[in-house]
Image (tube, grey):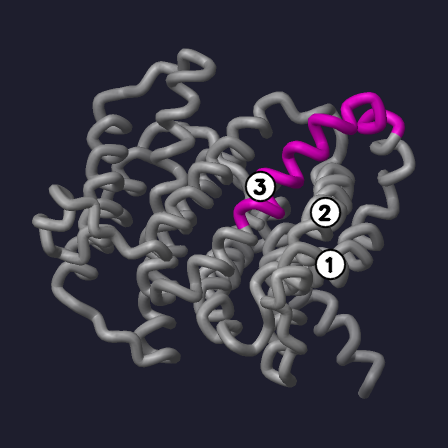
Amino acid sequence: MSDHVAPVQKTLWQAAWDNPILLLALTALIWAAHAVVGRLAVGQIAPMTLTCARWALAVGPIVWAARGTLRRDLETLRPRWLFVGAMGALGFTAFNALFYAAAHHTGALNLSIIQGAIPALVLIGARIAFGVRITGMQALGTLATMIGVVVIAAQGDWSRLATFAFNSGDLLILIACVFYAFYTLGLRTRPDVSGLGFLAAMAFAALLTSIPLMIIEIVKGDFIWPTRQGLLLLVFAALGPAFLAQVLYMRGVQLIGPGRAGVFVNLVPLFGALMAILLLGEPFAAYHLLALALVVGGIAIAQRAPAATGPRS
Protein backbone atom coordinates (compact mmCIF):
# COMPACT_ATOMS: atom_id res chain seq x y z
CA MET A 1 0.00 0.00 0.00
CA SER A 2 2.88 2.34 0.80
CA ASP A 3 4.15 1.82 -2.78
CA HIS A 4 1.04 3.58 -4.04
CA VAL A 5 1.07 6.41 -1.48
CA ALA A 6 4.50 7.83 -2.40
CA PRO A 7 3.66 8.42 -6.11
CA VAL A 8 0.35 10.05 -5.16
CA GLN A 9 2.10 12.36 -2.67
CA LYS A 10 4.73 13.20 -5.26
CA THR A 11 2.02 14.02 -7.76
CA LEU A 12 0.23 16.28 -5.28
CA TRP A 13 3.43 18.11 -4.38
CA GLN A 14 4.32 18.51 -8.05
CA ALA A 15 0.83 19.78 -8.84
CA ALA A 16 1.13 22.36 -6.05
CA TRP A 17 4.63 23.35 -7.23
CA ASP A 18 3.29 23.90 -10.74
CA ASN A 19 0.26 25.95 -9.62
CA PRO A 20 1.22 29.65 -9.77
CA ILE A 21 -2.05 30.89 -8.25
CA LEU A 22 -1.59 28.70 -5.17
CA LEU A 23 2.10 29.58 -4.81
CA LEU A 24 1.59 33.34 -5.16
CA ALA A 25 -1.47 33.38 -2.90
CA LEU A 26 0.56 31.56 -0.22
CA THR A 27 3.36 34.08 -0.74
CA ALA A 28 0.98 36.98 -0.17
CA LEU A 29 -0.44 35.24 2.90
CA ILE A 30 3.03 34.80 4.43
CA TRP A 31 3.97 38.42 3.69
CA ALA A 32 0.71 39.59 5.23
CA ALA A 33 1.21 37.44 8.34
CA HIS A 34 4.53 39.22 8.82
CA ALA A 35 2.62 42.31 10.00
CA VAL A 36 0.87 40.25 12.67
CA VAL A 37 4.24 38.80 13.70
CA GLY A 38 5.65 42.31 14.03
CA ARG A 39 2.92 43.29 16.46
CA LEU A 40 3.04 40.05 18.44
CA ALA A 41 6.81 40.43 18.80
CA VAL A 42 6.46 43.64 20.82
CA GLY A 43 7.73 42.89 24.33
CA GLN A 44 8.66 39.33 23.33
CA ILE A 45 11.87 39.99 21.38
CA ALA A 46 13.67 43.29 20.73
CA PRO A 47 13.28 44.65 17.16
CA MET A 48 16.97 44.77 16.17
CA THR A 49 17.52 41.35 17.73
CA LEU A 50 14.67 40.02 15.61
CA THR A 51 16.10 41.70 12.51
CA CYS A 52 19.54 40.19 13.01
CA ALA A 53 18.54 36.78 14.33
CA ARG A 54 16.05 36.09 11.53
CA TRP A 55 18.81 36.36 8.94
CA ALA A 56 21.14 34.28 11.09
CA LEU A 57 18.50 31.53 10.97
CA ALA A 58 17.46 32.06 7.36
CA VAL A 59 20.91 32.06 5.77
CA GLY A 60 21.35 28.29 6.24
CA PRO A 61 18.14 27.18 4.46
CA ILE A 62 18.64 29.77 1.72
CA VAL A 63 22.22 28.65 1.03
CA TRP A 64 21.04 25.02 1.01
CA ALA A 65 18.31 25.84 -1.52
CA ALA A 66 20.86 27.68 -3.70
CA ARG A 67 23.57 25.03 -3.40
CA GLY A 68 23.26 23.87 -7.01
CA THR A 69 24.40 27.16 -8.57
CA LEU A 70 25.86 29.08 -5.62
CA ARG A 71 29.54 28.49 -6.39
CA ARG A 72 29.10 29.65 -9.97
CA ASP A 73 26.94 32.58 -8.88
CA LEU A 74 29.51 33.77 -6.36
CA GLU A 75 32.12 34.09 -9.10
CA THR A 76 29.83 36.58 -10.82
CA LEU A 77 28.73 38.33 -7.63
CA ARG A 78 32.18 38.78 -6.06
CA PRO A 79 33.21 41.78 -8.23
CA ARG A 80 29.90 43.47 -7.34
CA TRP A 81 30.06 42.87 -3.60
CA LEU A 82 29.32 46.52 -2.84
CA PHE A 83 26.10 46.41 -4.88
CA VAL A 84 25.05 43.15 -3.21
CA GLY A 85 25.79 44.61 0.21
CA ALA A 86 23.77 47.73 -0.51
CA MET A 87 20.82 45.66 -1.75
CA GLY A 88 20.85 43.48 1.35
CA ALA A 89 21.19 46.52 3.61
CA LEU A 90 18.34 48.44 1.97
CA GLY A 91 15.83 45.75 1.11
CA PHE A 92 16.41 43.35 3.98
CA THR A 93 18.11 45.06 6.93
CA ALA A 94 16.74 48.62 6.78
CA PHE A 95 13.25 47.56 5.76
CA ASN A 96 12.87 44.97 8.50
CA ALA A 97 14.53 47.08 11.22
CA LEU A 98 12.12 49.94 10.54
CA PHE A 99 9.22 47.49 10.14
CA TYR A 100 9.75 45.92 13.57
CA ALA A 101 10.39 49.32 15.18
CA ALA A 102 7.18 50.66 13.62
CA ALA A 103 5.22 47.74 15.08
CA HIS A 104 5.89 49.19 18.55
CA HIS A 105 3.91 52.30 17.66
CA THR A 106 1.21 51.28 15.18
CA GLY A 107 -1.10 48.35 14.53
CA ALA A 108 -0.75 45.42 12.14
CA LEU A 109 -3.69 46.84 10.21
CA ASN A 110 -1.77 50.03 9.43
CA LEU A 111 1.44 48.09 8.75
CA SER A 112 -0.38 45.96 6.19
CA ILE A 113 -2.17 48.75 4.36
CA ILE A 114 0.77 51.16 4.19
CA GLN A 115 2.96 48.45 2.65
CA GLY A 116 0.60 48.60 -0.29
CA ALA A 117 2.35 51.86 -1.23
CA ILE A 118 5.48 49.99 -2.36
CA PRO A 119 4.36 49.37 -5.99
CA ALA A 120 3.38 53.04 -6.32
CA LEU A 121 6.72 54.18 -4.89
CA VAL A 122 8.53 51.84 -7.30
CA LEU A 123 6.60 53.31 -10.22
CA ILE A 124 7.46 56.87 -9.16
CA GLY A 125 11.10 55.89 -8.63
CA ALA A 126 11.30 54.21 -12.04
CA ARG A 127 10.04 57.38 -13.65
CA ILE A 128 12.57 59.58 -11.81
CA ALA A 129 15.59 57.29 -12.03
CA PHE A 130 15.12 55.57 -15.38
CA GLY A 131 12.66 57.76 -17.26
CA VAL A 132 10.14 54.93 -17.45
CA ARG A 133 6.92 56.14 -19.07
CA ILE A 134 3.90 56.16 -16.77
CA THR A 135 0.55 55.54 -18.42
CA GLY A 136 -2.63 57.32 -17.44
CA MET A 137 -3.93 54.21 -15.68
CA GLN A 138 -0.69 53.81 -13.74
CA ALA A 139 -0.76 57.47 -12.70
CA LEU A 140 -4.36 57.12 -11.53
CA GLY A 141 -3.57 53.95 -9.60
CA THR A 142 -0.50 55.51 -8.01
CA LEU A 143 -2.49 58.56 -6.93
CA ALA A 144 -5.24 56.41 -5.40
CA THR A 145 -2.68 54.32 -3.51
CA MET A 146 -0.86 57.33 -2.10
CA ILE A 147 -4.15 58.95 -1.04
CA GLY A 148 -4.95 55.72 0.79
CA VAL A 149 -1.64 55.92 2.66
CA VAL A 150 -2.37 59.56 3.58
CA VAL A 151 -5.79 58.51 4.91
CA ILE A 152 -4.08 55.98 7.19
CA ALA A 153 -1.43 58.45 8.32
CA ALA A 154 -4.09 61.05 9.12
CA GLN A 155 -6.29 58.40 10.76
CA GLY A 156 -9.27 59.88 8.96
CA ASP A 157 -8.70 63.27 10.62
CA TRP A 158 -7.70 65.73 7.90
CA SER A 159 -6.65 68.34 10.47
CA ARG A 160 -3.62 66.13 11.15
CA LEU A 161 -2.33 66.99 7.70
CA ALA A 162 -2.09 70.66 8.63
CA THR A 163 -0.29 69.99 11.92
CA PHE A 164 1.73 66.95 10.76
CA ALA A 165 0.45 65.10 13.85
CA PHE A 166 1.13 61.64 12.47
CA ASN A 167 1.68 58.36 14.27
CA SER A 168 5.45 57.74 14.44
CA GLY A 169 4.92 54.06 13.61
CA ASP A 170 3.07 54.93 10.40
CA LEU A 171 5.91 57.24 9.38
CA LEU A 172 8.53 54.57 10.13
CA ILE A 173 6.80 51.95 7.99
CA LEU A 174 6.40 54.51 5.19
CA ILE A 175 10.17 55.20 5.31
CA ALA A 176 10.71 51.43 5.27
CA CYS A 177 8.60 51.24 2.11
CA VAL A 178 10.78 53.92 0.48
CA PHE A 179 13.88 51.84 1.26
CA TYR A 180 12.22 48.78 -0.21
CA ALA A 181 11.28 50.73 -3.34
CA PHE A 182 14.96 51.65 -3.78
CA TYR A 183 15.83 47.97 -3.37
CA THR A 184 13.25 46.94 -5.95
CA LEU A 185 14.56 49.48 -8.44
CA GLY A 186 18.04 48.11 -7.85
CA LEU A 187 16.86 44.72 -9.08
CA ARG A 188 16.82 46.18 -12.60
CA THR A 189 20.62 46.04 -12.61
CA ARG A 190 20.93 42.69 -10.85
CA PRO A 191 23.88 40.54 -11.93
CA ASP A 192 23.08 37.65 -14.25
CA VAL A 193 22.89 34.93 -11.60
CA SER A 194 20.19 32.57 -10.31
CA GLY A 195 17.49 34.06 -8.11
CA LEU A 196 18.37 31.82 -5.18
CA GLY A 197 22.07 32.56 -5.52
CA PHE A 198 21.40 36.29 -5.43
CA LEU A 199 19.05 35.84 -2.47
CA ALA A 200 21.74 33.89 -0.58
CA ALA A 201 24.29 36.66 -1.15
CA MET A 202 21.85 39.37 -0.04
CA ALA A 203 20.78 37.36 3.01
CA PHE A 204 24.42 37.11 4.10
CA ALA A 205 24.82 40.86 3.51
CA ALA A 206 21.68 41.48 5.57
CA LEU A 207 23.09 39.41 8.41
CA LEU A 208 26.36 41.36 8.42
CA THR A 209 24.69 44.78 8.22
CA SER A 210 22.15 43.97 10.93
CA ILE A 211 24.76 42.94 13.52
CA PRO A 212 25.72 46.58 14.31
CA LEU A 213 22.05 47.40 14.91
CA MET A 214 21.77 44.60 17.44
CA ILE A 215 24.99 45.71 19.15
CA ILE A 216 23.65 49.27 19.44
CA GLU A 217 20.42 47.90 20.88
CA ILE A 218 22.37 45.98 23.52
CA VAL A 219 24.61 48.95 24.39
CA LYS A 220 21.57 51.22 24.79
CA GLY A 221 20.04 48.72 27.20
CA ASP A 222 17.08 47.96 24.96
CA PHE A 223 17.89 44.26 24.53
CA ILE A 224 15.45 41.79 26.08
CA TRP A 225 15.85 38.04 26.29
CA PRO A 226 13.40 36.48 23.82
CA THR A 227 10.45 34.76 25.44
CA ARG A 228 9.14 31.42 24.18
CA GLN A 229 6.64 33.32 22.02
CA GLY A 230 9.44 35.58 20.82
CA LEU A 231 11.48 32.58 19.70
CA LEU A 232 8.52 31.09 17.84
CA LEU A 233 7.92 34.40 16.07
CA LEU A 234 11.62 34.54 15.19
CA VAL A 235 11.46 31.08 13.62
CA PHE A 236 8.42 32.09 11.56
CA ALA A 237 10.08 35.34 10.42
CA ALA A 238 13.19 33.41 9.36
CA LEU A 239 11.56 30.44 7.65
CA GLY A 240 8.42 32.22 6.39
CA PRO A 241 8.97 35.70 4.90
CA ALA A 242 12.77 35.43 4.68
CA PHE A 243 12.94 31.98 3.08
CA LEU A 244 9.78 30.15 2.01
CA ALA A 245 7.96 33.20 0.61
CA GLN A 246 11.02 34.07 -1.46
CA VAL A 247 11.19 30.58 -2.97
CA LEU A 248 7.45 30.49 -3.68
CA TYR A 249 7.51 33.94 -5.27
CA MET A 250 10.45 33.08 -7.51
CA ARG A 251 8.69 29.93 -8.64
CA GLY A 252 5.48 31.87 -9.31
CA VAL A 253 7.37 34.45 -11.38
CA GLN A 254 9.06 31.62 -13.28
CA LEU A 255 5.67 30.12 -14.16
CA ILE A 256 3.70 33.23 -15.20
CA GLY A 257 6.18 36.11 -15.41
CA PRO A 258 6.77 39.15 -13.17
CA GLY A 259 3.93 41.25 -14.56
CA ARG A 260 1.16 38.79 -13.75
CA ALA A 261 2.83 37.68 -10.53
CA GLY A 262 2.99 41.29 -9.34
CA VAL A 263 -0.82 41.45 -9.33
CA PHE A 264 -0.79 39.24 -6.24
CA VAL A 265 0.71 42.16 -4.30
CA ASN A 266 -2.94 43.29 -4.09
CA LEU A 267 -3.61 40.49 -1.64
CA VAL A 268 -0.98 41.53 0.92
CA PRO A 269 -2.79 44.54 2.45
CA LEU A 270 -6.11 42.70 2.15
CA PHE A 271 -4.87 39.53 3.89
CA GLY A 272 -2.96 41.60 6.44
CA ALA A 273 -6.00 43.68 7.32
CA LEU A 274 -8.16 40.60 7.76
CA MET A 275 -5.59 38.88 10.00
CA ALA A 276 -5.09 42.02 12.09
CA ILE A 277 -8.82 42.16 12.75
CA LEU A 278 -9.48 38.43 13.21
CA LEU A 279 -6.28 37.38 15.04
CA LEU A 280 -5.35 40.52 16.96
CA GLY A 281 -8.81 42.01 17.40
CA GLU A 282 -7.67 45.40 16.13
CA PRO A 283 -10.52 47.89 15.60
CA PHE A 284 -11.55 48.50 12.01
CA ALA A 285 -12.62 52.11 11.49
CA ALA A 286 -14.31 53.63 8.46
CA TYR A 287 -11.06 55.31 7.41
CA HIS A 288 -9.37 51.89 7.35
CA LEU A 289 -11.99 50.68 4.86
CA LEU A 290 -11.51 53.78 2.72
CA ALA A 291 -7.71 53.46 2.82
CA LEU A 292 -7.82 49.73 2.04
CA ALA A 293 -10.11 50.32 -0.93
CA LEU A 294 -7.84 53.08 -2.25
CA VAL A 295 -4.62 51.11 -1.78
CA VAL A 296 -5.83 47.77 -3.16
CA GLY A 297 -7.80 49.47 -5.93
CA GLY A 298 -4.85 51.68 -6.80
CA ILE A 299 -2.52 48.69 -7.06
CA ALA A 300 -5.02 46.87 -9.27
CA ILE A 301 -5.39 49.87 -11.58
CA ALA A 302 -1.65 50.58 -11.78
CA GLN A 303 -0.79 46.96 -12.52
CA ARG A 304 -3.08 46.76 -15.52
CA ALA A 305 0.11 47.82 -17.30
CA PRO A 306 3.42 46.02 -16.62
CA ALA A 307 5.48 47.48 -13.76
CA ALA A 308 8.66 46.42 -12.04
CA THR A 309 8.16 44.54 -8.81
CA GLY A 310 10.46 42.54 -6.61
CA PRO A 311 10.18 39.96 -3.85
CA ARG A 312 9.48 41.03 -0.31
CA SER A 313 11.81 40.37 2.55
| Disc on the earlier residue, 3 or 1 | 1
Asked if residue 132 shows in the view, the reply is yes
Type of residue at label 2? Ala
**Quadrant containing the N terminus in the rendered view:** bottom right
Mark 2 in CB contact with mark 3 (< 8 angstroms) = no
Type of residue at label 1? Ala
Q: Which residue is drawn at 50% across and 39% down?
A: 180
Mark 2 in CB contact with mark 1 (< 8 angstroms) = yes
Residue at the extreme top of the image, as rendered: 131
* Residue labelled with disc 2: 203
Q: In this view, does 277 lie above or below 24?
A: below
**Going by the image, does 177 lie left or right of 199?**
left
Give the spatial CA distance, label 2 vs label 1: 8 Å
Report the front residue among 155 and 59: 155
* Residue labelled with disc 1: 58
Q: Residue 177 lies in what quarter of the image?
A: top left
**Residue 91, labelled with which disc?**
3
Give the spatial CA distance, label 3 vs label 1: 15 Å
Dot 1 crowding, Cα within 10 Å, few <14, some 14–19, many 20+ = many
Q: What is the x, y in percent for residue 107?
A: 35, 66
Q: Is residue 102 above or below residue 119?
A: below
Report the front residue among 2 and 31: 31
Type of residue at label 3? Gly
Q: Is residue 118 above or below residue 288?
A: above
Residue at the extreme bottom of the image, as rendered: 1
Residue 68 in the magenta stretch? The answer is no
Q: Which residue is drawn at 25% across and 39% down?
A: 146
Dot 3 crowding, Cα within 10 Å, few <14, some 14–19, many 20+ = many
Q: What is the x, y in percent for residue 247?
A: 66, 52
Q: Which residue is drawn at 55% across and 53% down?
A: 97
- Magenta residues, as a range? 75-95
